[in-house]
Image (cartoon, coloured by chain):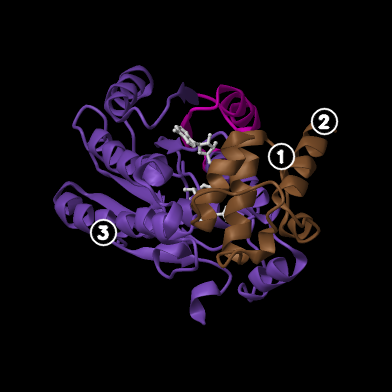
Chain colours: A purple, B brown
Amino acid sequence: MYHPFDMQRRRILVTGAASGIGRATCVALSQLSARVSAVDIDAEGLAETIRQLAGDGHSQIQLDLTQLDQIAPAVTKDAAANGSLSGAVHAAGLPCVEPIRLLEPDAYRRALIVNTEAALSLARAFQRKDVCAPDGGAIVFVSSVMGLVGSPGSAAYSMSKAALHGLARGLALELAPRRIRVNCVAPGFVNTPMFARLAGFWDPQERARVEADHPLGIGSPEDIANAICFLLSSAGRWITGCILPVDGGYTAK
Amino acid sequence: MSSLYSTLTKLLEVDAVQPDDKLRDFDNWDSLTVLSLCAHVDASCGVSLSAQDLQAVNTVDDLERLIASRKAA
Ligand SMILES: NC(=O)c1ccc[n+]([C@@H]2O[C@H](COP(=O)([O-])OP(=O)(O)OC[C@H]3O[C@@H](n4cnc5c(N)ncnc54)[C@H](O)[C@@H]3O)[C@@H](O)[C@H]2O)c1
């Protein structure tokens, strides 16, 4: 029976796979019968993700994405060993909440490299003829509502995420002739270890304010994973260059 | 702890801070400053303080002692 979300015989590479949204994406993809190449700097977290996956044929790649020149060799090696890729998801990311007076280049550079520049390097690696499946594929960058709107202290993070939107639109047009689609998912606040760290600093009033900003409440990693699967699957085959907010209504206001 | 003092001088935009300076007396002491300070303390000392914890803190020295006691705990 045809199912537009079915991922059988597709291999999808996911960065940030050891935690939060990246891990939930790996799990959801495996439940749709995809094979997953899980990438993260955190080897222990990766091993736990692999344990949670359905099916077999998955691989794990321990990689520090700030080493931009190591991304293409690692991706090419994985494709040669395990088969060509039909999709790539960039979910690795770092928060950066700083007032502008603290935004010296060193304070935001790591977040900019992991959030933004690594996404470009990943897309470059993915589109190679010896990596991408011959019938094309799809790329999803996990940006943020903070790439669409701002908040005090978000300047550097917003910059890193808004840049992903430009990257996705440019690549969407450049890679369309090769049937490679490029989209972004822009999450609102989602309950992950990154969120928990940040929320730990808030007082109850701030917590209540953030919750009220999301008419459907704080999201779960699965909410984002499902949207990513949709964009990667055949159900999303006419969608490219799109920024999809998945935010419980955060940007509707 | 010297990293705490250097973070505070940058955050509060002053040349130096003294142990008995009152945090709330600085012009820059607002909710974003508190959030940023919590993130720095977490990153440099592995101690997770909340905005509420900081409400109970009066001076720089109090803050230093709070971090030390959380670290020991
Ligand atoms: N949680 C939220 O509320 C939220 C909201 C909007 C957007 N996002 C974005 O979603 C993505 C996933 O966030 P999350 O909440 O799951 O965070 P998380 O911290 O739980 O997971 C992020 C993962 O990225 C990995 N990573 C960080 N630096 C790396 C590096 N140099 N090399 C390789 N891997 C590295 C971490 O090891 C971790 O496994 C991020 O891009 C984040 O900016 C999150």
Q: Nearer the viewer, mark 3 or mark 2?
A: 2
Q: Amino acid at mark 3?
A: Gly
The magenta segment is A28-57
For the N terminus of chain B, give its image quadrant: top right
Identify the residue under disc 2: B72
Q: Nearer the viewer, residue A126 or A203?
A: A203
Q: Position of A211 compared to A204: left or right? A: left
Q: Look at the numbered disc 1 and give the secondary structure of its residue.
A: loop
Identify the residue under disc 3: A166
Where residue A8 sits in the image (x, y, percent)? Answer: 45, 39
Taking the image as drawn, is residue A86 in sight? yes
Asked whether the residues under the numbered discs 3 and 2 touch, taking CB atoms below 8 Å apart as contact, a structural biologist would say: no
Q: Position of B67 compared to A2: left or right? A: right
Query: Are the residues under badges 3 and 2 in a single subunit?
Result: no
Query: Are the residues under badges 1 and 3 in a single subunit?
Result: no
Judge: label 3 CB < 8 Å from ligand 1: no
Identify the residue under disc 1: B47
